[in-house]
Image (tube, coloured by chain):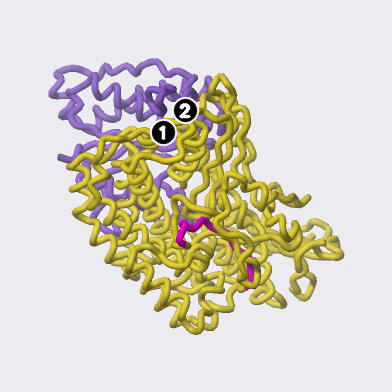
Amino acid sequence: MTAPTLIFGWGNPSRGDDALGPLFVDHFAELVRRHPEWGEVECLTDFQLQVEHALDLAGRQRVLFIDASLDAPEPFTLTRIKATRDDSFTTHAMSPQAVLKVYADIADEPPPAWLMAIRGEGFELGEALSASAGDNLHAALAAAAEWLMLANPSAHRDAGTAPTASPPACHANHEAVSAASGGRSP
Amino acid sequence: MSFELETATHPEQLRRVAIDPVSRVEGHGKVTILLDDDNKVHQVRLHIVEFRGFEKFIQGRPYWEVPVMVQRLCGICPVSHHLAASKALDMVMGVRQLTPTAEKMRRLMHYGQMLQSHALHFFHLSSPDLLFGFGSDVASRNIVGVVAAQPEVAKKGVLLRKYGQEVIRMTAGKRVHGTGSIPGGVNKSLSAEERAELLKDAYTMVAWSREAVHLVRDLFARNLVEYNAFGRFRSAGMCLVRADGAMDLYHGGLRARDIDGKPLFDHFDYSRYWDVIAEGVKPWSYMKFPYFKAFGPEDGSYRVGPLTRVTHCDSIPTPLADKEREDFLAYDGGSAAGATLGYHWARMIEMLHAAESIKDLLHDDDIVGTDLMATGERQERGVGVIEAPRGTLIHHYRVDENDQVIRANLIVSTTHNNQAMNTAVREVAKQYLDGNEVTEGLLNHIEVAIRAFDPCLSCATHALGQMPLEVSIVGADGTVIDDVTRGADGLVRLETPTLP
């Protein structure tokens, strides 16, 4: 069964603060495991948004997109977005609004969607997450937990409690690629 | 010495038009054009801001981590880097022959990458130009325009892409940052369930890929004169071929032909690639210009990728794609095989080959085997070469006694095509811009020529707020004469500022 809530963050984990999207997804997936009362939540990540990600929207009741941003004020912005034709479909990397538009054109009315743009500073290959981006990520995780409660009141009701999810600590050093996750020890 | 239109005699007296960045191209590309008062073209250059931090990123890492981490060099073709690095590090481990299961799993992953990459490029990045015309209204010249005009074409493009991604997920173990290929073999084979899941749609993907070949063939038929002439130039070429001369996108020897199509070298052992190719530099470009040593930096440029592979191989080892190759080579006396836009046709033939190969591999019981790893005698150097979607990709590493990479050299497909892309845009500038008033539609012709090569500029940084298109026409004194801007709404505005 398709999870009604989709969390989709994108970025390159090895390009400094571009890792904000995938790091958010990693941490939020852990929060979801600790809070079964939130219901079914699917957390997905990729390097970039592309046309085929429109297919990930099928059967959802709500979608939260997460990306790093050079323009957003600190620590983040959370904006309701709608299907829009913009110029991003002219590149290999699409905007979430354009992905919603593709879904609307090839399938159906897209689910309600929000974009969380987390402020980042540096995007060079091999850089670690900046300290300020780590702080922004922490704030964004807390806000996303609140967003999920508001967007999905039944989760709140099922738990019988006020939202109390506190995000895990966000470590700045995400650079190492461990043998356990990727390679084989010789 | 430089190529025609590479360097103007008196650039200070000319107007400068910049296309920055080039759209529907990964990363950052920029074209500058110098025009005189009569709009006659004097200089055209494609500048690619190539990132040269690969080596630093890799050096000092344990070699067994490299196939995973190199995927982060590029958000567009991570699987190509994953496999090229694995092949290079097979050599470091002294493995000369993978187990059948390991080789077939890697090939399956590679064909999945080829399928999804070619589908994205044709259906979503190039078909708007081809379906609506190079100079058509920019408001509809995009994938959303394709969806509106031909929804079934666009939908099949999305689903072909998705299927390729599923092949990658099941062979690499993860949707992104896969770990399936490791030095000496693979760490997983397909489960029976995964095999059955992929087989369900395999024949549909073959059928749709064949339709795509016929779609581009029909587009050629309708626009034969324009397509054949567009950015046309003669070029040498290089690709891998199998021992019998057949197309092999995963492994083989290097085959090169000169500008007249005569053999330059064949079945050359790629582990000594530096004996036949070198990389030149030009003061105006960050990206290097590889060339065949036999002809030197001025005459030795070549091109790589689908058009070269389809025209240089003796056959394609899957029947439907081979039939399409024969038709392509014979079409209109072979004219399309020499056209820059022939890349699109060749790319779809390769997509069909990838779909057929996926289907065949899924019927091969080795794909669910359990013998995953081979071993050998440790070496200090390894070279891995594959035919990535955009062309020949070379990874070269030296590893010290502590298993750390101490030297890395990568020559990516787009670098091989640097001179060829520059030549193509100069030809198009001569054909379409020379003497004409510059418009967005005419400038798009330049971009169409670049997109034919599907360059991937290995950026993968895409923070919100980037990727506009701005074209400025600047007078000799630095004054902006015209501004062309493609805004967030996709529309282009031409503004002429009031001069003081």
| Frontmost residue, B111 versus B128 | B111
Task: Quadrant for the C terminus of chain B, please.
Answer: bottom right
Residues at circles 2 and 1 in contact by the CB criterion of under 8 Å = yes
Q: Earlier in the sequence, mark 2 or mark 1?
A: 2
Residue at image coords 31%, 41%: B101
- Residue of label 1: B182
Q: Residue A9 vs residue B479: left or right?
A: left
Q: Which chain is yellow?
A: B
**Disc ID at residue A86:** none
Mark 2 nearby-residue class (10 Å; few <14, some 14–19, many ≥20):
many
Identify the image quadrant of the N terminus of chain B. Answer: bottom right
Residue stretch in magenta: B233-244
Q: Amino acid at mark 1?
A: Ile
Mark 1 belongs to which subunit?
B
Q: Chain of mark 2?
A: B
Is residue B105 visible from the viewing direction of this image? yes
Spot occupied by residue B240 in the image (x, y as percentages of width and height): 51, 56
* Residue B287 % position (x, y): 67, 49
Disc 2 target residue: B64
Residue at left offset 34%, top offset 48%:
B108
Q: Colour of chain A?
A: purple
Residue B66 picture location, percent across and down: 49, 31
Is residue B472 visible to the viewer in this orientation of the structure?
Answer: no
Query: Residue at (68%, 57%) from the top-left corner?
Result: B292
| Drawn side of residue B5 relative to residue B369, left or right | right
Residue B360 higher or lower than A66, as above or below: below
Q: CA distance from mark 2 to mark 1?
A: 7 Å
Front in this rendered view, residue B432 or B418: B418
Q: How many marks?
A: 2
Nearer to us in this view, B61 or A18: B61
Sort mark 1 into few (<14), some (14-19) or many (20+) by Cα contacts within 10 Å.
many
